[in-house]
Amino acid sequence: MILDSKIPSGPLEKKWDKHVMDGKLVNPANKRKYEVIVVGTGLAGASAAATLAELGYSVNAFTFHDSPRRAHSIAAQGGINAAKNYQNDGDSVYRLFYDTVKGGDFRSREANVYRLAQVSANIIDQCVALGVPFAREYGGLLANRSFGGAQVSRTFYARGQTGQQLLLGAYSGLSRQVGLGNVRMNANHEMLELVLIDGHARGIITRNVITGAIERHSAHAVVLATGGYGNVFYLSTNALNSNVTAAWRAHRKGAAFANPCYTQIHPTCIPVSGEYQSKLTLMSESLRNDGRIWAPKKKGDNRPADQIPEDERDYYLERKYPSFGNLAPRDISSRAAKEACDEGRGVGETGLGVYLDFKDAIARLGESAIRERYGNLFDIYHEITGERAYQQPMRIYPAVHYTMGGLWVDYNLMSSIPGCFVLGEANFSDHGANRLGASALMQGLADGYFVLPYTIPHYLADVPRDPAPPTDHPEFVKAEEDVANRTNALLSNNGKQTVRSFHKRLGKIMWDKCGMARNRSGLEEAIKLIPELRQEFDEDVCVPGTADNLNQSLEIAGRVSDFFELGELMCRDALAREESCGGHFREEHQYPDGEAKRDDENCAHVAAWEWKGKGEAPALHKETLEYDAVKMVTRSYK
Amino acid sequence: MKVTLRVWRQKDGDSAGKFEEYEAEGLNPNMSFLEMLDVVNEDLTTKGEDPIAFAHDCREGICGTCSCMIDGKPHGPETGVTTCQTYMRSFNDGDLITVEPFRASAFPVQKDLITDRSAFDSVVQAGGFITARTGSCEDANALPIGKEIADLAMDAAACIGCGACVAACKNSSAMLFVSAKAGQLNLLPQGQPEKDSRVLNMVATMDEAGFGNCTNQYECSAACPKLISEEFISKLNRDYLAASVKSAFKASAL
């Protein structure tokens, strides 16, 4: 496998313009002759499908949800970054680029991140034009707030529902194209296989989750915008149905999977309360603008928060990172919370929690100002815990939130399978080893609105303008058979253990061995344990019902079965990366003060894994990361 | 704690449904209602029975997927929350709880507690958008929008498209949903050029989909997990009336 990143030559600021100029175009009259499949209708998928349809391509969009508007982008709370410099605080394209590269611990591609910062301003313009109700000041201009890892206010937001508002904006554009007949919308369709003809992506196999019907769909190109794989940990802030299957099926067909071990553990989530827990809920990072994080100085101090005097509290982020304080990046804040709890200073029933305290902000600004900024988040906290954060500090603990890794793509967002493009969280490209807050929404919409529409013609212009391949092609027949065989194997197993029980056990292995801190022996153990668990699953899983109707157990079984293979790959990747960087903390690689020790000499690369077959060790390919415009420095927020 | 569930079971859209009773034991008051259903389903699966199908995804009250009628109320007993944000502490030990799908002829049952709400998508496709081609827009701050209007638009935009408003209405009217969608865009200056056609087309599609008429009792607003105000219905009626009159006496642009 040869990985050519296709990064254009020339100075950083000119690369994207040059690339757009150098690329091929498809004549407006010919665009409708090209069929493009878009899988997933979150920010990346919906914006891509709508924009490609506006341009004139024939678009076939798919989502396993009952409506495109339900994709998990909807749950993002805090905001979206853009280099508008509306606050006159010194922001610029270069500064957003630099903060993002530094935030990613110098493990992302310089050229990609610069492009992301360049198009960020256009995203805000586009969303406002679509009617997204961003927060405004009294004069009618847009408001901003600060987010972690930045010292400027560049984050645009819509109360605590920014993801929902951006998704509804993209969805309204998509809906318009559906109404016009330019997009065929297939809701309730789950992609279960990618179809390759002569090495190019030419279609997908889907299952209609309502009727159980297996369908073949062909096209000239396939775009995957299918989200992240945080649910491999069982408990995460992801929606319950988020999964890796579409991306994993592409991986098994030849798409390299890059940096699978880069997982973002978000520092401010509501702690686990019991065995029955099905998901974790995030409290937006924006709360760290006004909330102060602390743990008791004394071990095992179980007095209520208000009885712990000021001088017995450890505001550990302010102490360790005085210049960024409570707005230190996510990886650093999460690890610091874990350290406090590991030292026995955690709070709450389980001891797995620290305080996020608004007492000082309420005293300074008044309760109504805090309610205006965060009211809905305080309400969510109250619904879940029964506690009111106006009166007592929130308890928070880190939880799996986002996966920076994903399918490898080149500068055109094309995977190592020609004709298969990957957008949004599903690809690996822009966040390096750690994503900054408010950057996921930016990347999803950048990919869909402003990158893919420019790069897809570079590929399509060389594809003959013949109709898309017939679906009775032997490759379609074979792919459908594979899906049917996998489904039948799951249903006819007649085992004793439920899918959920296996998912829980897999999640525990992943969290213990490949979570916030990793080490060699733990990872080696996980690489042994996961295939054993997988075998037990194959032999003893119980999937009730049949394939020919709505069967939620069957859907979950297929997803969990792909999580086993992904989990093993994540552990292999974490083991191979002999350094600590961003969300990947290897206990063997740290400074005496516990800070992460990066190894730029040996590890400044993208680790792209090639599938070699079931039961075979995957092959590791390295794409060297070259930094021309910025110097790799030790990341300091002190 | 333990409760008895009376759950609507229906194999598919073509079959008749009926209530079945299940005992849910060993519950914790801090469990969400859906986590309680998870526990019941694990038990049913282990016993070789068909688990209860219910719609869910984000489990934090924002995706709008979950949709049960709990004791006759959409999203259960609490105000301003979805089913996934309903916790067992809202019930008493030993309660009998009736769980049904949203009932409306425009939302046919697909299985057990899952209904087809695609009629909402059709309404949005008919006009719930602003035509703004990607890349053709002016600078975001070139068009100031007063905070009051922006906040009102945001109040309408908080709609999660769950369908509780329809389920709560004795006529299965979708007026609260449609008024929130149209209201958001009609309030904003960007939404003005298409305001009339938006309202006429969305209302026509709403009627075609089989939703009933509004008789101004506002059960919808009371059941809405985002507490969207019934005043948006008044606004939709005003906008609809204005658009109808204008289209009836349409003069040429000159």
Image (cartoon, coloured by chain):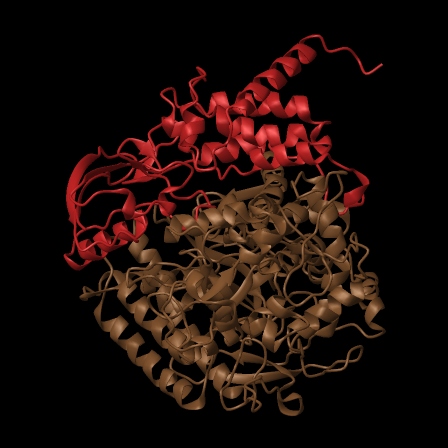
Chain colours: A brown, B red
Q: Give B37 or A91, whichever is nearer the viewer.
A: A91
Question: Residue A465, percent across and down?
Answer: 68, 54
Residue displayed at 40% across by 33% down: B164
Residue displayed at 51% across by 46% down: A376
Q: Say above or below: B159 vs A450.
A: above
Q: Give A32 or A211, whichever is nearer the viewer.
A: A211
Q: Kindly give the residue lying farthest to the top in the view shown.
A: B249
Q: Say above or below: B152 vs B25.
A: above
Question: Residue A151, percent across and down?
Answer: 72, 65
- Seen in the image, is B83 located left or right of residue B122? left
Quarter where residue A578 is shown: bottom right
Residue displayed at 71% across by 51% down: A123
User: Quick check: can you spot residue A260?
Assistant: no
Question: Residue B104, percent across and down?
Answer: 36, 27
Q: Say above or below: A172 vs A484.
A: above
Quarter where residue B15 is shown: top left
Q: Quadrant of the C terminus of chain B?
A: top right
Q: Give A535 or A166, whichever is nearer the viewer.
A: A166
Number of marks present in the image shown: 0
User: Quick check: can you spot residue B92?
Assistant: yes
Q: Give B140 or A240, whichever is nearer the viewer.
A: B140
Question: Residue B151, percent across and down?
Answer: 63, 36
Residue displayed at 65% across by 14% down: B242
Q: Say above or below: B93 vs B39.
A: above
